Image (tube, grey):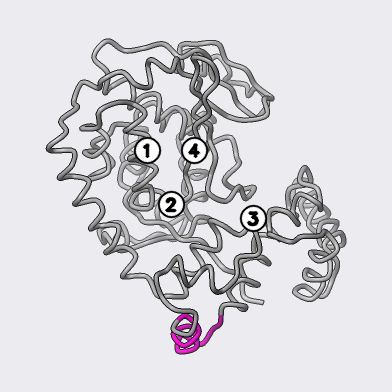
């Protein structure tokens, strides 16, 4: 079965390349190493695979000799590097509104970087929660980059600044753990159930320095138009695949439900996918198989958890489906992947 690759817009690459250049790294060599062309960076409609972006981050870390490259990227984040989305954020009324604006228009920046908010007493947690928690997106570099970026931009938008209650990370403390305290200026806890920034709720709702409701309303309208334009340039296959990737663990996801979300009839969905030489069942199976392989490469995720992540009601259903896709059981696949991984490290 052909493996499906998630793609994202190249809008975030120039800032990443500029950071590498400041460290004396050749941009040409860096892009050549990971197979990204200059023409892709200049095209607002261009995209690259998530795996290729991950390779670029890794290459930047190696080339700069900076194991904390994720924290570094987040720490130098500025709202004006996010183009229109950054302007929407900067004119929001509060940190909470800015975060919700980012969430609404994240597809224009990074479609799989996301968060959720949790309220408890007088505290609000901003929890790193990628749209689909595949092992790649759960690497420390992504939570480091995302949360450091949120903190840095939020600080820049407030007149008097603020202090976090604390910061939590799901991964173990790295060798550069002191850098976390330096960047977040608060107590840091590792090996936690989640990666999150904990704010005083009053901080989340305090007015921002650049709050400008009339301009903000206009910018949001422009961002909505860009979002519509982005979706219109996607083939129906990509639209269905994106929706599946974002929602596959939240139920069976019937064809009728997906058609409704895309504002077309089920019959139209079937007909248009047929014209693109595919079908809803084929796309759903392909997405499940691709995600299953990624989950199985992470030994910390149990078979029951994988089945749930993929929307199977019972682990046995996942077992039979995977054996149909790969001609081997998921357990055997995991053993083979662990064997190859161990040999590669030897």
Residue drawn at x 38%, y 47% as measured from the top left: 106
Q: CA distance from mark 3 to mark 2?
A: 17 Å
Say which mark, if any, is on residue 115: 4
- Where in the figure is residue 325, as x and y percent of width and height? 75, 74
Q: Are marks 4 and 2 in contact (CB under 8 Å)?
A: no
Say which mark, if any, is on residue 249: 3
Q: Quadrant of residue 92?
A: top left
Helix or strand or loop: what does disc 2 sit on? loop
- Where in the figure is residue 95, as x and y percent of width and height? 34, 26
Q: Is residue 273 magenta?
A: yes
Helix or strand or loop: what does disc 1 sit on? helix
Say which mark, if any, is on residue 254: none
Q: CA distance from mark 1 to mark 4?
A: 10 Å
Helix, strand or loop: magenta stretch: helix
Residue on which disc 1 sits:
100
> Magenta region: which residues?
269-279
Between discs 3 and 1, the one toward the N terminus: 1
Q: Are marks 3 and 2 in contact (CB under 8 Å)?
A: no
- Where in the figure is residue 204, as x and y percent of width and height? 38, 21
Q: CA distance from mark 4 to mark 2?
A: 12 Å
Viewer-proximal residue among 302 and 47: 302
Q: Is residue 41 magenta?
A: no
Say which mark, if any, is on residue 111: 2
Q: CA distance from mark 3 to mark 1?
A: 23 Å
């Amino acid at each position: 079965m052909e493996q499906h690759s998630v793609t994202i817009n190249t809008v975030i690459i120039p800032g990443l390349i500029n950071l590498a250049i400041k460290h004396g790294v050749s941009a040409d060599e860096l892009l050549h190493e990971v197979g990204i062309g200059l023409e892709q960076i200049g095209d607002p409609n261009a995209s690259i695979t998530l795996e290729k972006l991950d390779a670029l981050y890794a290459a930047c870390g190696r080339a700069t000799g900076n194991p904390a490259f994720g924290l570094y990227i987040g720490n130098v984040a500025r709202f004006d590097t996010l183009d229109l989305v950054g302007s929407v954020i900067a004119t929001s009324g509060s940190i909470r509104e800015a975060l919700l604006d980012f969430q609404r228009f994240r597809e224009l920046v990074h479609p799989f970087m996301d968060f959720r908010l949790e309220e408890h007493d007088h505290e609000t947690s901003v929890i790193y929660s990628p749209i689909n928690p595949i092992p790649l997106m759960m690497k420390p570099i992504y939570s480091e980059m995302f949360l450091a970026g949120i903190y840095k931009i939020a600080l820049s938008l407030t007149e008097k600044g603020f202090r976090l209650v604390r910061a939590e990370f799901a991964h173990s403390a790295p060798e550069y753990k002191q850098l976390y305290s330096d960047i977040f200026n608060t107590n840091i806890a590792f090996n936690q159930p989640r990666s999150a920034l904990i704010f005083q709720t009053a901080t989340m709702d305090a007015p921002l320095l650049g709050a400008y409701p009339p301009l903000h309303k206009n910018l949001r309208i422009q961002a909505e138009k860009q979002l519509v334009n982005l979706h219109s340039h996607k083939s129906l296959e990509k639209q269905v695949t994106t929706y599946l990737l974002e929602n596959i663990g939240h139920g069976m996801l019937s064809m009728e439900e997906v058609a409704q979300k895309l504002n077309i009839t089920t019959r139209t969905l079937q007909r248009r996918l047929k014209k693109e030489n595919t079908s809803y069942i084929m796309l759903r199976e392909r997405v499940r198989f691709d995600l299953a392989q990624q989950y199985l490469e992470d030994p910390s995720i149990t078979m029951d958890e994988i089945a749930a992540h993929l929307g199977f009601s019972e682990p046995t259903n996942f077992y039979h489906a995977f054996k149909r896709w790969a001609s081997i059981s998921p357990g055997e696949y995991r053993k083979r992947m662990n064997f190859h991984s161990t040999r590669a490290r030897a």
